[in-house]
Image: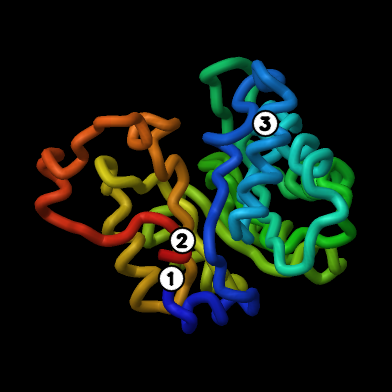
């Protein structure tokens, strides 16, 4: 990511990212709790300075693991989290964008992460049943209360990004993007043009793209674009 985009959200340029969706608990506790803690600590030791998570990862377990592994957080480590996408059960995701709910989840994330202010708080997915200004407005209120430093969005189309930017400053967009899944090219290009940070979720496809011997160069979509997929590259 360019320095101009990093500075757009007033945080030091990240040197590496951990996506807790891939690295920690998705549903229920990790099979190996100690290994999850080791991975988080090792990532920071290796220079990762942005960890992205959400209240729905676990649910809640991912945030609690991050606190257990890393709190008190080292200087320069950015913790980003999200709210607005619930987990009624394994494999089930339901957006809930009621302002009171988003504010409640922010309070819980503050507690689970052990912080007084969230560096980057993101709307996890827009709820089609709730006007977008109401959903973004809830995050604005939290920022005014000093409970989050910056506001980001996730799983947004360009039209939704523009609507959100008409309400308040949006510093980042987080959409599905990796070497073989590039449907978010338009949103990535939009972020590049407008100085927004783009955070890819599922960057290594739940580990599939990190398997030994995988030949991503033979994937047809890669012939179309060689754009780096990880924040900080």
Residue 69 as seen in the image, left or right of residue 2: right
Mark in the foreground, 1 or 3: 3
Indicate which disc residue 231 carries: 2
Local SS, label 1: loop
Q: Is residue 202 above or below residue 162?
A: above
The 10 Å Cα crowd at callout 1, few under 14, some 14 to 19, many 20 or more, is many
Residue 110 as seen in the image, left or right of residue 88: right
Q: Dividing the picture into quarters, in which one does residue 209 lie? A: top left
Task: Determine the CA span between mark 1 and mark 3.
Answer: 27 Å
Q: Is residue 225 above or below residue 113?
A: below
Mark in the foreground, 3 or 2: 3
Task: Determine the CA span between mark 1 and mark 2.
Answer: 6 Å
Observer-nearest of 9 and 96: 9
Image location (x, y in percent) of residue 42 = 65, 45
Write the residue at 78% across / 67% down: 75
Q: Are the residues at dot 1 and dot 2 in contact (C-beta closer than 8 Å)?
A: yes
Q: Quadrant of the N terminus?
A: bottom left
């Amino acid at each position: 990511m360019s320095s101009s985009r990093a500075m757009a959200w007033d945080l030091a340029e990240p040197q590496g990212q951990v996506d807790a969706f891939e690295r920690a608990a998705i549903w229920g506790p990790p099979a190996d709790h100690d290994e999850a803690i080791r991975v988080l600590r090792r990532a920071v030791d290796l220079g990762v300075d942005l960890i992205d998570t959400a209240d729905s990862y676990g649910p809640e377990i991912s945030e609690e693991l991050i606190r257990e592994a890393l709190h008190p957080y080292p200087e320069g480590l950015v913790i980003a989290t999200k709210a607005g996408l619930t987990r009624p059960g394994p494999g089930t995701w339901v957006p809930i964008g009621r302002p009171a709910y988003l504010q409640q989840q922010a309070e819980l994330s503050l507690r689970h992460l052990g912080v007084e202010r969230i560096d980057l708080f993101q709307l996890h997915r827009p709820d089609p049943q709730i006007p977008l200004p109401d959903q973004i407005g809830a995050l604005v209120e939290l920022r005014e209360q000093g409970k989050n430093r910056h506001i980001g969005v996730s799983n947004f189309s360009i039209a939704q990004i523009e609507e959100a930017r008409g309400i308040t400053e949006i510093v980042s967009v987080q959409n599905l993007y990796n070497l073989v899944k590039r449907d978010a090219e338009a949103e990535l290009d939009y972020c590049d043009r407008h100085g927004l940070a783009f955070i890819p979720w599922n960057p290594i496809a739940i580990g599939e793209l990190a398997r030994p011997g995988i030949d991503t160069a033979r994937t047809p979509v890669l012939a179309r674009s060689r754009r780096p997929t990880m924040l900080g590259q």
